Image: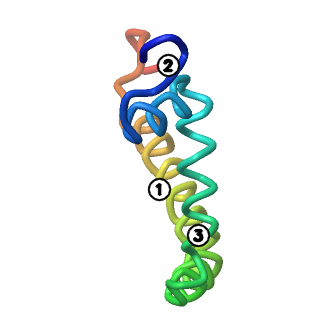
Amino acid sequence: MKDGHHETLWDFVSSLFETTNEKITAAISGAAILSPAFPTFKQTSDTATLLMPILGCLWLLSQIAFKWYGHFSRPKDGPDGT
C-alpha cells in the first residue's frame, strides 16, 4: 500500500479480511449465499435430526453400562469384602 492506496486488487481484497472476526464472518456469509446451490444440505439436516437423539440415547446408555460394570466389578476394600 502506497500513500493509503492499494497496489493491486489482491491487496485491497486481503485488507478487507484482516481480523479473525472478519474472516469468519466472510466465510459464513459466503456459505449462506452458496447454500441454495446444494439441496442435499436439507437431506443431511433431516437425517441428522432423526439420528442424533437416537445416537445420544445409545451413548448415554453405554456410559451408564460402563459405570455400572466398573462399580460392581471392582474388588471390595475391606478384609471381609465390604
Q: Quarter of the image holding residue 14? A: top left
Query: Image height check: is 52 above or below 44?
Result: above
Residue depth check, mark 3 versus mark 2: number of the one nearer the observer: 3
Q: Mark 2 is on which residue type? A: Thr
Q: Cβ–Cβ below 8 Å for labels 3 and 2?
A: no
Front label number (2 vs 1): 1
CA–CA distance in space, label 3 to label 2? 41 Å
Residue bearing the label numbered 3: 52
Percent position of residue 20, x then y: 54, 27
At x 41% / y 21%, what residue is drawn?
76
Residue drawn at (54%, 80%) of the image: 41
Quick check: 31 above or below 8? below
Q: Check disc 2 and report its element: helix, strand or loop.
A: loop
Q: Would you name the residue on which mark 1 appears? A: 62
Instruction: Identify which amino acid the numbered label 3 is placed on.
Output: Met
Residue that badge 2 annotates: 82
Chain-order first, disc 3 or disc 1: 3
Judging depth in this view, the residue of 47 and 19 nearest the camera is 19
